[in-house]
Amino acid sequence: MTPITKLVLLIAVAVLVFWLVTRLRNSTRRDRVSFRPVEDLPQDVQQSIDHALAHDKKVTAIKLYRQATKAPLDAAKAAIDVREWKRG
């Protein structure tokens, strides 16, 4: 095999590996956030969250949700956003 052929083959393999890795990353990336709805939490926690939202204390509502569920920040924010949207 000539050096040029080896170089072309090496570049082709590198491009293929790069494409496969990129494809794998994109297929395993989670763009969706799953969370437990506030409606599924105990009544006292729901009331505390609703009270915080009624007084424009969204950060407090997120903290209350996280304490009750041990959820990550993005899931807690999504749950509180949905609760706020449902409340109108």
Image: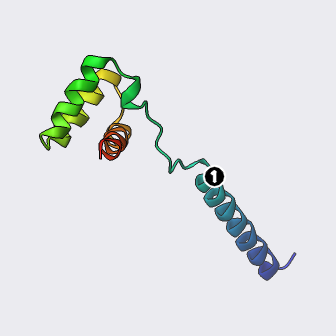
Image position of 40 with respect to 22: above or below: above
- Across and down, in percent, residue 50 comes to 23, 32
- Neighbour class for label 1 at 10 Å: few (<14), some, many (≥20)? few
Vertical arrangement, residue 43 with respect to residue 3, above or below: above
Q: Position of residue 4 (x, y in %)?
A: 78, 82
Q: Secondary structure at mark 1?
A: helix
Q: Is residue 20 left or right of residue 74?
A: right
* Point 29% across, 47% down: residue: 88
Give residue 67's position: percent from left, percent from top: 26, 24
Asked whether 51 or 67 is in front, the reply is 51
Taking the view exactly as shown, the residue that stands out farthest to the left is: 55
Farthest-out residue, bottom: 4
* Residue 5 or residue 87, whichever sits in front: 87
Q: Amino acid at mark 1?
A: Ser
Image quadrant in which the N terminus is located: bottom right
Residue position marked by numbered label 1 in the rendering = 27
- Residue in view at x 38 percent, y 38 percent: 75
- Left or right of 14? Residue 9 is right
Q: Nearer the viewer, residue 15 or 42?
A: 42
